[in-house]
Amino acid sequence: MTLEEFVNKYNGVKVDFDNYAGAQCVDLARQYWKEKEGIKEHTGPCTTTGGAKDLYLDYNKMPLEKKYFTRSSTKSPKPGDVVIWDSSPTNKYGHVAICLGLLGTDSIIVFEQDGFKQDGAKVNVRSKKNMLGVLRKK
């Protein structure tokens, strides 16, 4: 499956990979890792807070993430990278999205899902502000 095929398959779809707490941003990333990247093992919940930011911040405590991905603090993600943002005043959990491309120097075109809105996966433009880095398949 290509990245484009994955986006076409799930655009507008609520993806609840773990059947817990509805369609969260991490659910879309895990579905992507399973279908596009061929990772059959479930990498489990995020560790410390249960938030998306922990995929980056707690990477060293997550053996399956370490097995399949490299963590990078790059601010220039490549298509297919899972981009991770830190918490913010309106979202204590942080956020993850799949990079589709860069838009100028300050924005990223992403495929993402909003766990608060529960409105399904969609293509969006997101600022690099508060970005921690990426997980990139080894």
Image (cartoon, helix red, strand yellow):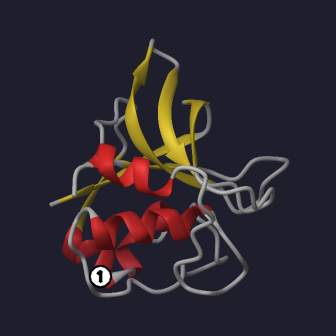
| Amino acid type, residue under disc 1 in the picture | Leu
User: Which residue is painted at 40% across and 40% down in the image?
Assistant: 99
Count of residue discs: 1
Judged left or right of residue 19, residue 75 is left
Q: Can see residue 84? A: yes
Residue 137: name its quadrant: bottom left
The residue sitting at the top extreme is 104
User: Which residue is painted at 36% across and 54% down in the image?
Assistant: 6
Residue 95: name its quadrant: bottom right
Q: Position of residue 49 (x, y in %)?
A: 67, 76
Q: Nearer the viewer, residue 119 or 89?
A: 119
Judged left or right of residue 4, residue 47 is right
User: Which residue is painted at 42% across and 48% down in the image?
Assistant: 7
Q: Which quadrant of the rendered structure holds the C terminus?
A: bottom left
Q: Position of residue 79 (x, y in %)?
A: 30, 38
Judged left or right of residue 91, residue 80 is left
Vertically, is 54 above or below 70?
below
Q: Secondary structure at mark 1?
A: helix
User: Which residue is painted at 32% across and 43% down in the image?
Assistant: 4
Q: Position of residue 60 (x, y in %)?
A: 36, 74
Per the image, the residue denoted by label 1 is: 64
